[in-house]
Structures are given as structure tokens and as C-alpha cells.
Amino acid sequence: MLTIILVIALPVTGFLGYALRAYFGKIKLNSAEARSHRIIQDALKEAENKRKELLLEAKDQLLKEKNVLEKETRERRQELQSIEKRLIQKEETIDARIDDIQKQEKILALRDQETKEREDELKKEFEKHRQELEKIAGMNSDEAKELLMKKVENETRFDIARLINKIEEEAKRTADKKAKEIIVSSLQRNASEYTSENTVTTVSLPSDEMKGRIIGREGRNIRTLENLTGVDMIIDDTPEVVVISGFDPVRREIARLSLERLIQNGRIHPARIEEVVEKITKEIEETMLEEGEKAAYNLGIPGLHKDALYNIGKLKFRTSYGQDVLAHSIEVANLAGIMAGELGLDVQLAKRAGLLHDIGKGSIVEGEGAHAIVGAEMAKKFGESDKCINIIASHHNDREQESFEAVLVQVADAISASRPGARRESLDTYIKRLENLEKIASDFKGVEKTFAIQAGRELRVMVDNAIVSDEKAEVMARDIAQRIESELKYPGIVRVTVIRETRIIDYAR
């Protein structure tokens, strides 16, 4: 800016000098020219100095900016080079891995080919040897298998007959009188009450007004309670009483306790019913474990697995021909232990196996087949000894008995079951029919829960709405009814109700 001002000032100064020179005349001409010349020279020198200073400053600033730009450029270039180097390394690594994979694939392909060829060769050799053996033996493989099976069967029959003769000879050595004394003594020392099981339970109400609250608007409360517990609630003209009907004692107990808890609390609606039923179910499970621990403690049987104690406790809510299975198992354990003590055998083993002998009756999903075999498989999972497992499996002759304790448990089981009034055939047949009803429905895909209610006159089937559509539900109801007609014998008519529900839950916080 100063340079521009000086450049502009030069002609102005010259013009002023010329005017002064003309104005003052020739008198001061020499003096004015000298002064103006000096002023011009000074101004030019000063302008030149300023110009040089400005140029130097501009060069310095330009140099600094150039250096900064070059530094940033170098850093960016180095960064790009580093990234490029890493990418190249990764690409090389990937290529190497691809090469390794391809090599491995080739090796595997060759091995598969070799294995296949080897299998073909072995099959050919096997077939060749089989044909040679059949040619030498003069019979084919099926005939050889049949011959071998007959031979094994004959040998097994001979061994069984020999074992039976041995047991009979050993039994004859013991006097009949001693055996009778032992059995009579055992029965006298282990007297227990007769057992009986009903399929209905009554719950007392504080007032008839409570019946309406239990039923709920359009019956939604009682319907929810029946669906969750799998029982039938009967509310009739009987004052201040609700009847709970169901063949499964566990479900009836859950329904009874849930209903009593709801009546005591006073708040009865579907959400509260679900909460109470879930809580009562957990309490029943805890009760099962406590009952198992109590039975083992009273019998003096230590070291039982926790799952074994839980399954023993489940027997409290199971019946066999109307007999409480847990009470029956405790009675069998006591009888077997007393007889083992009289005969000088293993008392602890007899009592332990006696308590566990019917454990398979409390299980539906752990196995299939006779409850003795299922119970033996469960005992094996619980870490029981081979002798104990054999006793459980053989107490109904499903397996061969391998010890005297096994015979004692079988005898104790027969004594406990044959007492007058201990069992009722009709109830067990009825319960099995209801269980078969539920099992038939459970075999269908998409079924979540099944409940046989109203003494077997109705079967309610809860299905998964994501798997079973409305159309499939109709077909399922018809198919279940047809299977019931073809597989079961029952009085009257069985109503099949397939329930498909969509439930969406959210929370306002």
C-alpha cells in the first residue's frame, strides 16, 4: 500500500515543484529545484526501501506457507503409503490362505476319492467272502442268522432253567415257617393306613357372591383357571362350595391352592390368576423336593441325588390303582429293609431300592416302556449302583433278578399292593384312559398342552397359533376325534376342543 501511495505521490510532487517554480519565478528557481530534487530523491529512496521490505515480508510468508504445505503433503503421502502397504500385506495373506484352502480341498477330494474306492473294494471283498462262506456252509446269511439265534436261544433257556433250579434249591433250604415268621413280623412292624384316591376336590367359599367373581365376566376367570390348571371347575347350586374335578392329583392340588389363594386375596382376574397359578406351581415343585428329602430322612437313606429326591416327591401326587405311590414306596422300603435284616442281607440296599422301585411312575418324558425299565434308566442317571438298578428293573420281572435283595423288593411290593383296600382297579383304569386321551392329542404337530376334563367327556387341546392355522385347527379336531374313536374304548361321547389363541403383551412403565 505504501508503495502505491509513493508511486501516486511522485507525479503530484513533480507537478507541485513545477508550479512553485513557475510561481516564484526565476528568483527562487535554483533553490526550489535543488530542494525539490532532494525531496524527490528522498521520497524515491524511501519508496524503494518500503518496496524491498514488503517484498521480503511477502517472500517470507510465502516460504512459510510453502513449507507447511510441503510438510502436510509429505505426511499425507506417508499415510497413504502405509495404508497401501497394509492393503498389499492383507492381499498377500488372503492369497496365501486361498492357496492353502485350495490345496486342502484338493487333498480332501483325493482322500474322499481314495476312501470311496477303498469302501468299494471292501464291499467287493466282503461280498466275495460272504459268498465263499455261504458256499462252504451250504446256507445263506439269513439261514445262518436263524441258526445262530436258535442256538443262542437254546443256550439261554438252558442257563435260565439252571438258574431257576438253583434258586429253587436255595429257597428249599429255608424253612417255610421261618419265611412266614419274617413276613408276618415285617407286616406287624410296618402297619400303615389304607389309601384311597378321589378325582374331585371341594373348596369352601366365604359366600355365594364369590361364585360370580370366580366365574368372571362372560366366564373369562373360570375359563382361564381351567385352561391353566387342566381341571374342570363345577359351580352348581350347592351353597358356598366349588367342586374341582380332574384325574391328575397334581393339577387338582394346584387348582385348589390357587383358588384358595385367589379367594383369600380377593382380586380375581385373568392376569392375577396366571400369576397365582405360576407361583403355586413353583411351590408344589418345592414341596415335591421336600417330600422326597423327608422320605429319605425318615428311612435313613443318605446320598440320594437331588433329582432322585425330586422324582420321589412327585410320587406323592401319583396313584396306582388308587394307592398313593409315595406311601406305597415308603412301605415297600420298610418291608424290604426289615426282611433283609432278618435274613442277614444288605438292609440299606433293600431300603434304597424299595424307595426307588416305582420312581418311573412319576416320569412321562424320561423314557418309554414299562415303568420298571424307565425307573432303572433314571436311577442310572442318578448314579445308583448296578445292584440297585437291577432291583428296580426286575421288580416286575422285566429283567432277570441278580440278587436276593431284588427278590425281597419284589415280595415287599406284592405285599404292599395286595393288602385289602390298598388298591382299586376301576380308578386306575379310568386314569389310564384319561392319560391316553391326552397322549393321542399330544402326538399331533403344533400341540402345546392337552387337558382331559369333565371325567373324560371333553379333551381340550391348546395349540401354537404360529404353527396351526384356523383351517388346520378344524382338521386337527376331526383327526383327533377319529383317532380316539379307533384306538380307545369309552362310554358316551368325547368332545374335542382345539383352542388357538393369539396373546400380545406390553407394559406401561
Image (cartoon, helix red, strand yellow):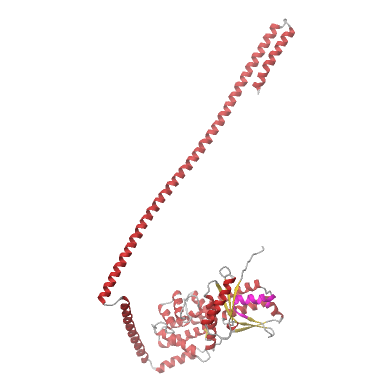
In the rendered image, which quarter is residue 213 located in?
A: bottom right
Dividing the picture into quarters, in which one does residue 471 lie? bottom right
The vertical placement of 500 against 29, above or below, is below
- As drawn, is 400 to the left or to the right of 509? left
**Which residue is at 36% across, 90% downward?**
168
Quarter of the image where the N terminus is located: top right
Q: Residue furthest top?
A: 27
- Residue 102 percent coordinates (x, y): 39, 53
Look at the magenta stretch and give its main secondary structure.
Answer: helix
Q: Is residue 356 above or below residue 24?
A: below
Q: Is residue 126 visible?
A: yes
Residue farthest to the left?
136
Closer to the camera, 385 or 343? 385
Q: Does residue 98 appear to the left or right of 30 in the view shown?
A: left
Quarter the C terminus occupies: bottom right
* Residue appearing at x 64%, y 78% in the figure: 259
In the rendered image, residue 216, in percent from the top left (x then y), is placed at 69, 76
Q: What range is drawn magenta here?
A: 215-232
Q: Position of residue 292 (x, y in %)?
A: 52, 78
Task: Examine the structure image and report whether residue 222 is included in the region drawn in magenta.
Answer: yes
Say which of 481 and 251 sits in front: 481
State the residue lying farthest toward the bottom.
177
**Res 290 seen here:** no
At which x and y percent is residue 159?
A: 33, 84
**Quick one: 19 or 196, which is closer to the camera?**
19
Residue 110 within the segment the image draws in magenta: no
Instruction: Reply above or below: 403 against 124.
Output: below
